[in-house]
Amino acid sequence: MKILFTICGRAGSKGFKNKNLKKLAGKPLAQYALSLIKIYQRRHPENECVISLNTDSNELIELMVHLDPSVKVVKRKPELATDTVGKIEVIRDSFFNLESSEEPFDLIVDLDLTSPIREISNLEELITAHLNDLTKDVYFSVVPARRNPYFNMVKQIDEKVTIVNESDFTSRQQAPKVFEMNASMYSFKPDFLKEHNYIFDGECGIVQMKDYLILDIDSEEDFEWLEFLFPKFLEDSAELKEIYEF
């Protein structure tokens, strides 16, 4: 099987300047994604793994190539470096640049650069789940939601407040299970990725991650909290420690 791993990162950031170049516990965020892939590759030598970076940041390119010279760099097109472009379009651009008719990819797996708290088993579960159910076009990671739109989430339109999804449920246990997308990992079938910009245009599957792994770096405050909690995460997870020490 041939897997394309995509890592995407724009130059700069309006919300948190240069977040893609930050170091967590002394190591660049990019190194956590690379180490995860390398450990997966070592555990699954039967699979060919190609790693790509899609960016318009020269600093990020220099960093990634220093960490792993085998990384395939796809220069981000200006039209794909705006605030309104969805990430799936960038992932597809990497795929189009690196696909080969002689040796096509079986899956495209995206690892978010600013969601470094992933365990090796999370990635294995994502890939295995998708390969075992190719009726699905996309698999992605989630965590159990802390609030339920069928029970205790409300919306306000003008002066009227109502529950988000109309229901008669009187307890959370009665309501359907809901999850939060944590944007950490995605797996795409190539044919779906070629044609679609919206993941919910296809059949979707999910893999659950631990609740605390929802931590995503969108602000300086997020990063400060992650730095504070990270030693505890390493203490509690042998898999995270393996990635950190790889």
Image: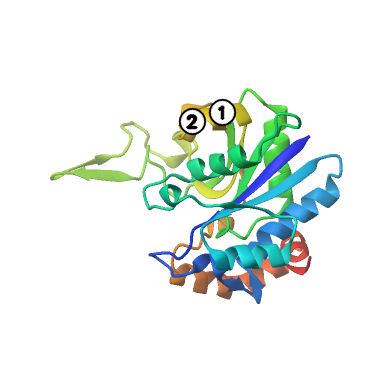
Q: Quadrant of the N terminus?
A: top right
Residue 25, located in which quarter of the rendered image?
Answer: bottom right
x then y, percent, for residue 158:
14, 44
x then y, percent, for residue 18:
49, 69
The residue that appears at 50% across and 67% down in the rendered structure is: 19
**Most foreground residue, 189 or 50:** 50
Q: Secondary structure at mark 2?
A: loop
**Most foreground residue, 40 or 146:** 40
Q: Mark 2 and 1 residues: CB-CB less than 8 Å, in contact? A: yes
Specify the amino acid type for callout 1.
Phe
Q: Secondary structure at mark 1?
A: helix
Q: Quadrant of the C terminus?
A: bottom right
Number of the label disc, if any, that sits on residue 192: 1
Q: Which residue is mark 2?
A: 196
Q: Can you say whether 111 is above or below 206 in the image?
A: below
- Kindly give the residue lying farthest to the top in the view shown: 135
Q: Can you say whether 55 is above or below 13 in the image?
A: above
The residue that appears at 33% across and 31% down in the rendered structure is: 168
